Image: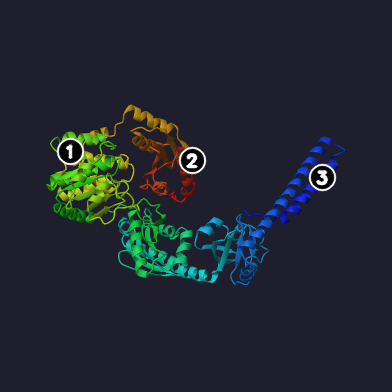
Amino acid sequence: MRRKKVWVTSPLMYLMAAVMVAMAAASYPFNRVMFAVELTAAGLCSLAVAVSGVVYRQNAAAAVRSAGRVLSAEEEESLREFPMPVAIVAPAGDLVWVNAAFEETLGAVRPGLGESVLRYIYPKTFRQVMEEKGTAVSYGGREYTVYGASAEHGYILYFVDDTHFKTIAREFRERQPVVCLAVFDNRDEMARDGAGGEESRITAEVEAVLRTWVVGELGGFIRRLSNGRFLFITDDAHIEEAKQKRFRVLDSVREVKNSRGNMSATISIGVGRGAAAVAESERWARQALDMALGRGGDQVAVTQGGDTYEFFGGLSKGVEKRDKVRTRVIAATLTDHVSASDRVFIMGHANSDLDSVGSAVGMWAAIRKGLGKQADIVINRGSTLAGALVDMVDDSYPGEDVFMDPAEALALATERSLLIVVDTHSTNYVESRELLERVDRVVIIDHHRMMVTHIKNALIFYHEPFASSASEMVTELVQYIRSSAIDRVDAQALLAGISLDTKNFVLRTGVRTFEASAYLRRRGADTVTVKKLFSNSLDSYKRKAQLVSGAEIYKGCAIATTSWELDDMRVASAQAADELLSIQGVKASFVLYKTGSGVSMSARSLGDVNVQLILEAFGGGGHFTMAGAQLKNVSMGEARRQLIHALDEKLEETTVSE
């Protein structure tokens, strides 16, 4: 990387040539062929050194002439006494002239002439220095800002020693106050499942852990607010140190358990860094805390404003909230907004599945039959993965136009229209981005963990990451809007959505999941009909089997890849990812398949690994046990290499400890 001076390396090379001549002479009595080979090599080496010496002297002479042409005698005298380090650099990047200040500071270790300028500006490049208006570099324990100027036969570099000012700026940044907000995620649930008087003991233990961490490690102060919330203030340097330790306070809090020992305490923390004022830092901390809670809790979200977040933790699956007060409030508010609208559009995510379509059908029934308002489900029939369910609903309501194309909905939307988005909250995954931007009044109903690209300024943001599915959430809402609005077909659509996201009631099921399913059974849902909605063709089943048989195991994760580009690959890959979890020793599964010029990923786990955190590295998202991502303009081999790299980096920190 550094170019040594020729007059330093040449003697060594001459010495090596002399040694080779001596070796040749020693071998002459024994092997004349070897003598000839070694003598020839020694001669070539000596010739190369001699030629390089000549070339260097020519270059050095040209450099000196260039320096002379760059500076006149008066200019050279002025710059030599200039108090700031100045250097003249030849077009090849060699130092050909430096002033006294340069020799005293940067050249104090050894003379600088003949060296490449990279010695003084690394890791920055000479090109960066010339293009930027001031480049920060460090050398010899000092910090400089380097400015470059072009001359007729070379370049002039000015080194401004601003170590003192940069030290002050760094100290100011490190001492900047940072506001943090924390909340005891599952206080009510732990107290309810424990013995009497649990709440006070558990809250006191969690507070003691937080206080010890904030005062002892962060050097800050903490204040307890109401409802299990805490506010604490520290400085930026201590937050950076906590980041390097990956906020180990989360692990300390998990050691607090209820009296039965079957539940651990968890906290969520929002951190607002880099704000201009304390009030702004507190606002950012609230946004970060909302993001952490929206992702399931038990984690720290750090933001510096905008949509940039860093997340730490998130290894708990989330605790089901049994109180339905919020559901009743949301149902009442939603009813008011529907009544104030001239038309309601219901839209799921792109490539809609049974949960997306099922929850949309449930909302359509509640609005159309329960509230008597015009409602339409916006769907792209060509890309839906729930074609069987769409056909079943169409056949059951021959006189109703239940489903509508996105282009038609866009033409019918007005200022009084209401858009209900189900089973997604990201602007990147909705069925029609244009319709979302066209309608100002938006309601969100979703269960996926919060993403940075979430829809903002919604009238209602009904987000429950602990819920099994959007269909479960809609089922609960419908009971408070108009319970009798759901008939047999609507109930079967909702039950199909719940069955899909719970893998037939195996994953992410809670008390409310079964309560919702029981209600749907009472409304006439037929489990046999629901089962038929999951039927596949023989070809699709064969493709799934081939994916499973071709998988490999890496660090306890099953990875399957295919280059097929077929219409049902999304379904087959998801089913293959589920099937791979039944293999002994597999903690998580990843299936990669081609989609156009990119690669899509389906990831699954049984709860031992948070696959959502792994796929977030690829811009994806989802749930603790089920996630997906899409990589654009990459080959299958490159996508697989990126996945392996992500597993190497994140698998350990995303694995739930026993």
Is disc 2 surrounded by few (<14), some (14 to 19) or many (20+) residues within 10 Å?
some
Out of 298 and 456, give the one closest to the viewer.
456
Return the residue found at the far right.
29
- Please state the horizontal and vertical placement of residue 605, each as a whole percent of the image: 39, 43
Q: What residue appears at the point 42 percent right and 33 percent down from the top-left corner?
A: 563
Please name the residue that numbered disc 1 is placed on. Answer: 488
Check disc 3 and give the amino acid type: Val
**In terms of sequence position, does the residue under pointer 2 or pointer 1 come before the other?**
1
Check disc 1 and give the amino acid type: Arg
Q: Quadrant of residue 490?
A: top left
For the residue labelled by badge 2, is the local secondary structure a helix, a strand or a loop? strand
Between circles 3 and 2, the one closer to the viewer is: 3
Distance from the alpha carbon under mark 3 to that under mark 2: 55 Å
For the residue labelled by badge 1, is the local secondary structure a helix, a strand or a loop? helix
The label on residue 21 is: 3
Q: What residue appears at the point 62 percent right and 57 percent down from the top-left corner?
A: 90
Please name the residue that numbered disc 2 is placed on. Answer: 554
Out of 650 and 472, give the one closest to the viewer.
650
